[in-house]
């Protein structure tokens, strides 16, 4: 029997009608969503039948919850999406429940021609994406003071801090995030088949089921691990398949530890780090404990247009402690004014911070 056999075609239509009704019913479990996509891409006939059922309501958008898209827009979407084989016309995750009533096969035939352009569009997408769609790159950027979070196709989450640019590439072998500049934090979804690698300059950090932070500064790259384990290496990345976790050789970094790579040189061991300070930016905060005033001021300047300028090297070395909203420069300026020996001049383009009669060696804290 062939796919043109009326009984087989009718059975396919029946399944398509079930899926269409399911998508109209509400959210679907991830496993059922994956089953739908697997069924959809198994044959162009499945796509044709599904779109034919959708045509009963005169628009594919009714099934997808997406606005109508031109052929050029569909192709552009395919080129920018490296997550799968065929465009997910189901839209957001949906829950499948058997429909109470199913449309008869003959009802949509007179109007099936309205779906031809959509069918052709999906076929074009299939060709553009080369079957698997692996290797396509997507760039994520934030401006000065901006922070964003994006879900990645594998279920991981990418948090992007201020003034950051990263490029994400997924392949059959690995998931790779390349940090051009700035800072990211990733919540890595476990995938036994593919490692998750963050590349920043000469530094690589590879993780499995891990939350970690990568900050590529002009003078160094900092890798801080929140949960799980990361293997940090420099130079040419050569994965190893001899260890059970699938991690490459390199310096192993565990929870609450940090590695600072300077000029492409990997230290001999990781160091403890205060995760409250390291991850505070995810809540748009700046937290510091016995940190030099100059470093804290520089951190505020990452997020705000009016900077704190401190020219006195001795004043920059004074240690302070506190916690602030990253955008609350007024509160930080008031805090500095309350410190012994510190003067703050509020100018239109900057906060000029200078010393007056500070007591030598004093440490300052805000609680």
Image (cartoon, grey):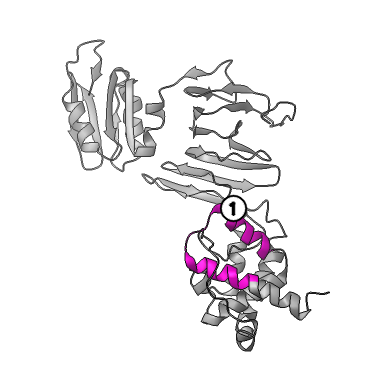
Q: Nearer the viewer, residue 232 or 31?
A: 31
Q: Residue furthest front?
A: 100
Q: Residue furthest top?
A: 360
Q: Residue at x 48, y 59 (%)?
A: 27
Q: Position of residue 142 (x, y in %)?
A: 44, 48
Q: Residue furthest bottom?
A: 110
The residue to which callout 1 is attached is 31
Q: Assess disc 1: are there few (<14), some (14-19) or many (≥20) residues with their C-alpha within 10 Å of its C-alpha.
A: few
**Where's the N terminus, which quadrant?**
bottom right
State the image quarter where residue 242 is shown. top right
Q: Residue at x 56, y 75 (%)?
A: 70
**Where's the C terminus, which quadrant?**
top left
108 displayed left or right of 59: right
* Secondary structure character of the magenta stretch overall: helix
Does 108 sit above or below residue 212? below
336 displayed left or right of 275: left
Total number of numbered labels?
1
Span shown in magenta: 15-41
Q: Nearer the viewer, residue 66 or 49?
A: 49
Q: Position of residue 268 (x, y in %)?
A: 59, 15
159 displayed left or right of 188: left
Query: Element type at marker 1?
Result: helix
Q: Nearer the viewer, residue 228 or 366?
A: 228
- Whether residue 121 is visible to the viewer of this picture, yes or no, is no
* Residue 17 belongs to magenta span: yes
State the image quarter where residue 344 is shown. top left
- Whether residue 248 is visible to the viewer of this picture, yes or no, is yes
Q: Nearer the viewer, residue 110 or 211?
A: 110
* Residue 224 belongs to magenta span: no
Q: Position of residue 60 (x, y in %)?
A: 54, 75
């Amino acid at each position: 029997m062939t796919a043109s056999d009326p009984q087989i075609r009718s059975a396919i239509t029946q399944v398509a009608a079930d899926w269409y009704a399911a998508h109209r019913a509400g959210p679907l479990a991830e496993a059922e969503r994956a089953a739908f996509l697997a069924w959809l891409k198994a044959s162009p006939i499945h796509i044709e039948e599904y779109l034919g059922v959708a045509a009963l309501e005169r628009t594919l958008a009714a099934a997808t919850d997406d606005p109508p898209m031109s052929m050029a827009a569909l192709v552009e979407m395919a080129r920018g999406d490296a997550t799968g084989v065929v465009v997910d016309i189901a839209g957001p995750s949906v829950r499948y429940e058997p429909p109470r009533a199913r449309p008869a096969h003959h009802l949509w035939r007179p109007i099936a021609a309205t779906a031809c352009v959509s069918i052709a569009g999906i076929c074009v997408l299939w060709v553009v994406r080369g079957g698997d769609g692996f290797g396509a790159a997507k760039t994520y950027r934030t401006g000065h003071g901006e922070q964003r979070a994006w879900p990645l196709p594998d279920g991981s989450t990418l948090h992007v801090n201020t003034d950051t640019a990263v490029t994400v590439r997924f392949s059959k072998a690995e998931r790779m995030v390349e940090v051009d500049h700035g800072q990211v934090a990733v919540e890595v979804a476990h995938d036994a088949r593919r490692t998750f690698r963050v590349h920043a300059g000469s530094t690589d950090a590879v993780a499995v089921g891990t939350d970690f932070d990568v900050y590529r500064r002009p003078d160094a790259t900092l890798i801080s691990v929140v949960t799980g384990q990361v293997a940090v290496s420099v130079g040419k990345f050569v994965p190893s398949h001899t260890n059970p976790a699938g991690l490459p050789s390199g310096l192993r970094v565990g929870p609450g530890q940090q590695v600072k790579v300077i000029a492409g040189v990997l230290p001999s061991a990781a160091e403890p780090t205060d995760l409250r300070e390291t991850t505070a930016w995810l809540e748009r905060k700046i937290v510091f404990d016995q940190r030099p005033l100059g470093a804290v001021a520089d951190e505020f300047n990452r997020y705000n247009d009016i900077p704190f300028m401190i020219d006195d090297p001795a004043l920059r070395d004074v240690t302070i402690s506190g916690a602030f909203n990253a955008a609350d420069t007024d509160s930080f300026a008031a805090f500095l004014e309350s410190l012994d020996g510190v003067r703050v001049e509020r100018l239109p383009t900057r906060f000029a911070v200078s010393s007056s009669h500070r007591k030598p060696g004093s440490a300052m804290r805000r609680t």
